[in-house]
Amino acid sequence: MDPYRNPFAPGAGSRPPELAGRDDILEDAKIACGRALLGRNPRSMMLLGLRGTGKTVLLNEIGRIAEKQGYFISKIEAPEHQSLARLLYPEMRKVLRALSSIEATKQLAHRGLRALRGFASIFKIEVAGAEIGVEPQPGLADSGDIQFDLPDLFTAIGKAAKAGGRGWVLLIDEVQYLSEADLSALIVSIHRMSQEGLPVIMVGGGLPQIARLAGEAKSYSERLFLYPGVGALDPASARQAVEKPIVEENAAISPDALTQIVTKTQGYPFFLQEWSSKAWDNAEGSEITKHDVDNAYTETLTSLDDGFFRVRLDRLTPKETEFVTVMASLGNGPYAMSDIAKALGKKLSSLGPVRAKTISKGMIYSTEHGFLDFSVPLFAEFMRRQA
Ligand SMILES: Nc1ncnc2c1ncn2[C@@H]1O[C@H](COP(=O)(O)OP(=O)(O)OP(=O)(O)O)[C@@H](O)[C@H]1O
Ligand SMILES: [Mg+2]
């Protein structure tokens, strides 16, 4: 069919034509935003899911929902090797600058900008433009310990926002890459917001291990955050994700073709978009048939293998690659560490470093004590195809 009208959106963070099966999460986010504006204890959120399940798309959507309620939105992606202070500084600055141009919040925002100035100098962040003339306020956000300074800044922003009937949502993608100190500082800050009834919420997204990382950083984070799982779509939602965009383009998909896509992708959003898109392009008539879908399968697989899967594998060293190759050779996960050690012919105790490095690259995660699994859905099958 006409590729110009192809509604599907394969690609990291691409907004899908139909955001299926996520109504509960979006509703919780909406409620959290509404409550925070009323000064009621909201639950911030951490979206937990494997690669390609739709976390980034959800963060963006939550940003849109919050914006409609009068929130300022900041979105950052945690980098592997950069400090949170540096990353957050321009975002906090932007919000405070916006607040400083509103009459009702001007004074409080100015206090925030002074705090930010102290923060910038202690964390050696370069300031430019109007900030150069701002005098820091001694004792405010300038201890050099992010766990003390970040809550001060959040408080300053929260108070200013509240005075103007506004709020601030901080969206953080790839939370698993934050250092423990940075993650702790964020949790402490959000805790402070909730204690003081200030309209500041954090919505994080990342691999499943962040639930444990957050718990280890601060035990109370369990009560502070909701941890919705962002997984494969249930069959009804997966059908909707594929069929609705097609029908909206005045085209159709036959029932057996639809079932084939939904079943073989196991409802994983990235795969649904990729295959549906290829099936659309392959279809001759205005109805996508089972024949079209089957024809598009090899092409879809090649595209996934060369892109989605390959980029992950390419980040590993030969030793790490050997480790995951052996994992995949054992079948589908989760995998007991002891089985991996046996298959590698190595002592369990010697595998700590390679395991830790592969986890830190976001390739695998520990599902429970002594067990590992891939953080990319269907990755084991991909590895076996390579072999
Ligand atoms: N609810 C949904 N219904 C249909 N398609 C979806 C849904 N959510 C996401 N998608 C599609 O899935 C793909 C992956 O989405 P996204 O990049 O948000 O995943 P992610 O979880 O952030 O992945 P990663 O962990 O690799 O960053 C995109 O092509 C997107 O359009
Ligand atoms: Mg993402």
Image (cartoon, rainbow, N blue to C red):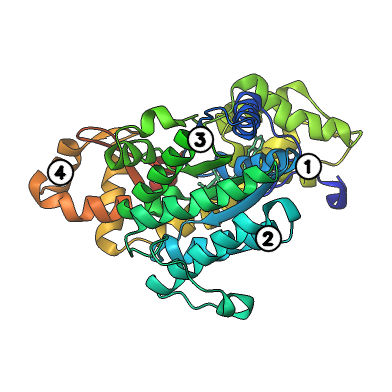
Mark 2 vs 1, N-terminal side: 2
User: 279 or 273, which lies in front?
Assistant: 273
Dot 1 lies on which element? Answer: helix
- Between marks 3 and 4 in the image, the one whose residue lies nearer the viewer: 3
The answer to whether marks 3 and 4 mark residues whose Cβ atoms lie closer than 8 Å is no
In the picture of the structure, the residue carrying the numbered disc 2 is: 100
Q: Residue 143, located in which quarter of the rendered image?
A: bottom left
**Would you place residue 293 above or below residue 154 in this image?**
above
Dot 2 lies on which element? Answer: helix
Dot 4 lies on which element? Answer: helix
Q: Is residue 134 left or right of residue 251?
A: left
In the picture of the structure, the residue carrying the numbered disc 3 is: 45
Mark 1 vs 4, N-terminal side: 1
- Between marks 2 and 1 in the image, the one whose residue lies nearer the viewer: 2
Mark 3 vs 4, N-terminal side: 3
Residues at marks 3 and 2, CA–CA distance in whole angstroms: 28 Å
Q: Residue at x 38, y 44 (%)?
A: 188
In the picture of the structure, the residue carrying the numbered disc 1 is: 280
Residues at marks 3 and 4, CA–CA distance in whole angstroms: 36 Å
The answer to whether marks 3 and 1 mark residues whose Cβ atoms lie closer than 8 Å is no
Query: Residue 28 appears at what percent x and percent y?
Result: 60, 26
Q: Is residue 386 left or right of residue 1?
A: left
- Between marks 3 and 1 in the image, the one whose residue lies nearer the viewer: 3
- Between marks 4 and 2 in the image, the one whose residue lies nearer the viewer: 2
Residues at marks 1 and 4, CA–CA distance in whole angstroms: 45 Å
In what quadrant of the picture does the N terminus appear? top right
Query: Residue 261 appears at what percent x and percent y?
Result: 65, 31
Can you tell me whether the CB of the residue at mark 1 lies under 8 Å from the nearest atom of ligand 1? no
**Would you place residue 272 above or below residue 40 in this image?**
below
Query: Three-letter amino acid code at disc 1?
Result: Trp
In the picture of the structure, the residue carrying the numbered disc 4 is: 341
Query: Three-letter amino acid code at disc 3?
Result: Met
